[in-house]
Image: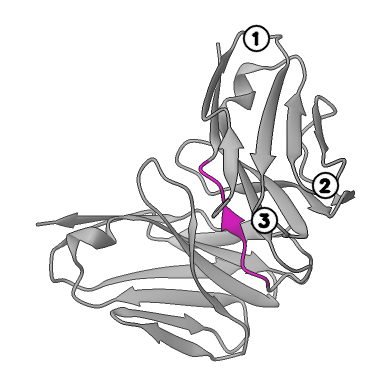
Amino acid sequence: GQQVMQIPQYQHVQEGEDFTTYCNSSTTLSNIQWYKQRPGGHPVFLIQLVKSGEVKKQKRLTFQFGEAKKNSSLHITATQTTDVGTYFCAGNPGANNLFFGTGTRLTVIP
Amino acid sequence: GAGVSQSPRYKVAKRGQDVALRCDPISGHVSLFWYQQALGQGPEFLTYFQNEAQLDKSGLPSDRFFAERPEGSVSTLKIQRTQQEDSAVYLCASSSGTAGTDTQYFGPGTRLTVL
């Protein structure tokens, strides 16, 4: 069945350091979405990637979609304490529902 | 309303009780999704509605779980004879279209604890 794995599961960084989370799907995806969930909160949509090899930037965040459309990454430059939370990738194999990854919990130490 | 709302926000049930969780999607949104999120895990898909039609219920873990959206707006997720393994946050999401590429907007969730 469909599986979406993320690494690392946890990441602690000093404020100002960079952070990267990687997402890998067992099957080819139609598109991939990234969400951020603050502690005690709900997933909030960040971005969607559709094209093979696509790269998108949002201020300090850079998102990539692999050439084979089976993997993706999120890179945060110069982390801030406001970046704290769990980052989920969510793959769409072509149906309506999303398959969420296992998430990477980011802690930023001031 | 401005966003997806869910009620109650917290629910404690004794094992064996029935519970009903409500979702109010963003007005006009065609698609509605239910997800189950266990502690420390990502949301897992339960079921999908397009207007009032339940097009996919492949994620419902057992026949104790039942969802409806009779008028194509508000949805209710019902769990009968709750078990301890049902303890989780139940998230509702809605989107304006019917494509898998449409952005899903999540509600705050209902945290269900089964004792």
Mark 1 vs 3, N-terminal side: 1
Indicate the position of residue B57 as horizontal and vertical percent values. Answer: 83, 45
Q: Are marks 1 and 3 on the same chain?
A: yes
- Residue behind mark 2: B58
Earlier in the chain: of badge 2 and badge 3, it is 2
User: Residue B105 magenta-drawn?
Assistant: yes
Q: Which residues are magenta?
A: B102-108
Host chain of mark 3? B
CB atoms of marks 2 and 3 within 8 Å: no
- How would you rate the neighbour count of disc 1 (Cα within 10 Å): few for under 14, some for 14-19, many for 20 or more? some
Identify the secondary structure beneath mark 2: loop
The amino acid type of the residue labelled 2 equals Ser
The secondary structure that most of the magenta stretch takes on is loop
**In what element is the residue under mark 3?**
strand
The x and y percentages for residue A27 are 70, 71
Q: Nearer the viewer, mark 1 or mark 3?
A: 3
Image mark 1: chain: B
- Identify which residue is drawn at 70% across, 66% down: B96
Which of discs 2 and 3 lies nearer the camera? The answer is 3
Q: Using the rendered image, report if marks 1 and 2 lie on a common chain.
A: yes
Please say if A94 is above or below A90.
Answer: below
Circle 3 residue:
B94
Image quadrant where residue B61 sits: top right
- At numbered mark 1, what does the secondary structure look like: helix, strand or loop? loop
Mark 1 — residue?
B15
